Image (spheres, helix red, strand yellow):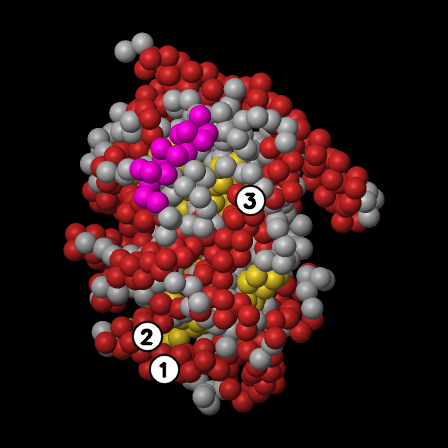
Amino acid sequence: MTIKPAATPARATVYGYPRQGQHRELKKAIEGYWKGRVTADALRDTAAELRRAHWRQLAGAGIDELPTGDFSLYDHVLDTTVMVGAIPGRHREAVAGDPLDGYFAMARGTQDVAPLEMTKWFDTNYHYLVPELGPDTVFSADSTKQVTELREALALGAAARPVLVGPVTYLLLAKPAPDVASDFDPLTLLDRLLPVYAEVLADLRAAGAEWAQLDEPALVQDRTPAELKAAERAYRVLGTLTDRPKLLVASYFDRLGEALPVLAKTPVEGLALDFTGAAAANLDALAAVGGLPGKRLVAGVVDGRNIWINDLARSLATLGTLLGLADRVDVAASCSLLHVPLDASAERDIEPQVLRWLAFARQKSAEIVTLAKGLGRGTDTITAELAANRADLASRAHSAITRDPAVRARTGAVTAADARRSQPYAERAAAQRTHLGLPLLPTTTIGSFPQTGELRTARADLRTGRIDAAGYEERIKAEIREVISFQEKTGLAVLVHGEAERNDMVQYFAEQLTGYLATQHGWVQSYGTRYVRPPILAGDISRPEPMTVRWTTYAQSLTAKPVKGMLTGPVTMLAWSFVRDDQPLGDTARQVALALREEVNDLEASGTSVIQVDEPALRETLPLRSSDRPAYLAWATEAFRLTTAGVRPDTQIHTHMCYAEFGDVVQAIDDLDADVISLEAARSHMQVARELAAHGYPREAGPGVYDIHSPRVPSSAEAAELLRSGLRAIPAERLWVNPDCGLKTRGWPETRASLENLVTAARTVREELSGR
C-alpha cells in the first residue's frame, strides 16, 4: 500500500518498557536491599538510572512520546493501590513506618503478616498483586511516584505521557478483603474512587503532563451492562474535569467489543486500541461506530507480546485504513513492551539470519518509528526498510527450520483414541491405591527444590568449561541425594528429585526438543524479581532422546518411596514460550504433546509409578472473550490427554496449576482426566477447593497449604487450619497435602521449616480424622 505524506505527522509511542535493565540490574538491587546489602537510597538511585536509560533508548530510537509511571519496583497494580491509598489494614502500620518496606511487605508478606493475593495479568505470564477492598475502604490520593517519574522524563527534554491503571480495571481486578463478605462488588466503590483519580490527574497536569493514559484492559473481556455503564460514568466524570491533562484511554490484549461505542461517546480526547491477533476486529468495529471524529487514535499494530518481526506492509495497510477514522492516528505496540525481552542484538548464539526474524523491545520500538514515518511522511520515505522486511519475512517462511514433514505426518495420524486412558478413573484409582499404598492425606511437593547459588555456579562453570560434564553430574547427584534424604527424614509420602539440573521448567525441555531456540539474555518479568527467559518456538517439534529419565531413575534408586517424574505440559510449553505465529496454536500443541508422550512412556517403562505433567498456564492462556474459549479448551485439554493417556491404569498421573482464577476452567480441569491435581490455594483461602466441590470434581486434589511466593514460614497450626478448610470441600480419601507451587525460588532454611510444618499439619489432621 502506498501512503502519501499526511498533513499531521504521525507520532510514535509505546505504553511501557521492560523494567529490569540489560543485565537485570533492578532484580539485583532489589534482592540486595532485601538482604541488607543495598541501601534504600542506592536502590532508588538504581531505579532512577534505569528509567533514564530506558527513556534515552526510546528517544534515541525516535519514539516521540515516552511513557512514565510504568516502571515498578514490584508490580504496577500494587503501585496503583499505593496511589489510591487502598492499603490493607494489616499492612498500614508497616507502610506508615517505612513506605518502602511496607510496599514490599504487601508484595511478599512478613513472618507475621500475609501478603496480597497474586494472580495472572489477564492472559499473560505476568503476575499482579490483587487489590483487597471492602465497603469501608477509604481512598486517598498519593501521586508522588507518578509525578516524580514524569518530572524525571521531562527533565531530559522529552515529551512524556503518564500511564496509569484505569479506575474501572482497577476495581474489576480487585477482590473483597478477607474480612469482607465474598459477594461484595468492588465496582460499587467507583464513585468513591473517581475523585482520587481526579486529584492525581490534576497533580500530573500541574507537573507538566499534556496527556495521561488510563489503561482499561478489563474492558476487552465480556462485560455486563452494569459494568459498561460504570465505564461510561467513569469517563464522563473524568472527561468533564477542567483541571487535567488530555485523556487517552487504552485497551489491549483483545477486541474492545461492546465497550468501544461506550468509550467513543465519552468526552475523552483519545483511545488506544490493539489491532493485532483477535484484536484486529477492532478495525471493523471502529468503522461501524463511525470512527473517532475529533479524537486521537493510537493504533497498536506492532505485537507487544511476541518476538517475531512485524509485517510492515500489512501494518501500513491497517494504518492507512485508520487514517479516515480519527482526527489523528499515531503508532504504537499493541500493549506494554513489558512482555518481551529488551534487545535481540544482545543474542550471540542465534544464527544471524534467524536473528533477523526476531524483534525484542528495542527492535519493536524501531518498527513503530518506521511505521510512524511511513504513515506520516509517506511510504516513499521507508522504501529500504520495506524491502528488507519483505526479505526477512520470506526467509522465515521458506526456511527448513520451520517445517519437518515427519513431525507433520505423525501429528496428522493422531486419533481420538490416542487421547483417552484405557480405563475410567474409578478403576484406575483402585489400581493405584493397591500399587502405591499411600496413607490418608498423602504429602508431597510440586517438584522443584531451592536452586542454590552453588547449583547456578555449577551450571555456569559447565558452560564456560571450568568443570567437565562428569564433574557437573556429580554435583547434581549430590544435590539429588540431599533432597531425597531430607524428604525421607521429613516424612513426605511421595518424593521428587528436586530438579537440580533444570534452569527453568520450560527452557529445560525446550533446549532438548527440536524446533525451539534458546536465548542468553531474553529475560522477561514474571513477578517481582522473578525473571524468566521464554524459549522461542520457531519450528516443528520432536524429541531426539529422553530428557528426564536418567535423573528420575537415579532418585528412585535412593529410596523405596515413590518418586514423581516431573514434566511441563504442552499448553504451558506454549504459554511460557514465544510461540510461532504461522500456524494454529492447537497444531503446535499437538506436536509438543506427542514429544512429551514419548517421555511419559519412557518414564513409566523405567519404573516411575507417579508422573506429574504440570499445566499452570491452562487458565492463563484462556481467551479473554467467552466465545473464543470452547475451541481453545478443546485443543488444550486434548493435548494434555494426548501426553498422558498412553500409560497403564496403575500409573498415577498428576498435574499442577497455580495463581489463576480456577473457577473459570473447572470443567476443563475435569476434562484433563488427571488422577491428581495440585493447585494454589493458600493466598486465596482455599477458594479453589470450594470451586472443585461445587463442580462435583470426582478425582483427587491437593489445594496448597503453603504459600511459596512469600518468604514467611507457615506454622503447622496455620497449615492444619487450611487443611481442615480443604476437608470441608474435598473428602479425606481424595485430599492431598502440598505447597502451592515449586520451591525453586525459596531458600533452604525456610523450605525445611515449612515442609516440616506441612507434614506435622497433615499428621495432626490425620489423627483427628482417625479419632472420630
In this orientation, which residue lies closer to the viewer: 618 or 288? 618
Q: Secondary structure beneath disc 2? A: helix
* Apparent side of residue 653 relative to residue 269 in the rendered image (left or right): right
Q: At x 32% / y 21%, what residue is drawn?
A: 724
Residue at position x 79%, y 42% from top? 470
- Distance of mark 1 from mark 3, alpha carbons? 59 Å
Tell me the quarter of the picture where residue 90 sits: top left
How many C-alpha atoms fall within 10 Å of the one at disc 1: few (<14), some, or many (≥20)?
A: few
Residue type at the position of mark 2:
Leu
**Rendered image: mark on residue 321:** 1
- The residue nearer to you, when weighing 354 against 448, is 448
Q: Nearer the viewer, residue 347 or 135?
A: 347
- Residue picked out by circle 3: 605
Q: Quadrant of residue 764?
A: top left
- Could you say where residue 179 lies in the image, as x and y percent from the top left? 27, 26
Helix, strand or loop for the magenta stretch, by majority: helix
Q: Which image quadrant is residue 316 in?
A: bottom left
Q: Residues within 10 Å of mark 3 (few under 14, many from 20)?
A: few
Relative to 264, say whether 290 is above or below. Answer: below
Mark 1–mark 2 distance (CA, rounded to whole Å): 8 Å
Residue 557: in sight, yes or no? yes
Whole-percent x and y of residue 310? 51, 73
Give the farthest residue toward the top: 771
Query: Residue at the location (46% across, 16% down)?
Result: 760
Residue numbers of the magenta segment: 423-437
Mark 3 against mark 2, which lies toward the viewer? 3
In front: label 1 or label 3: 3
Residue on which disc 2 sits: 283
SS category of the residue bearing label 1: helix
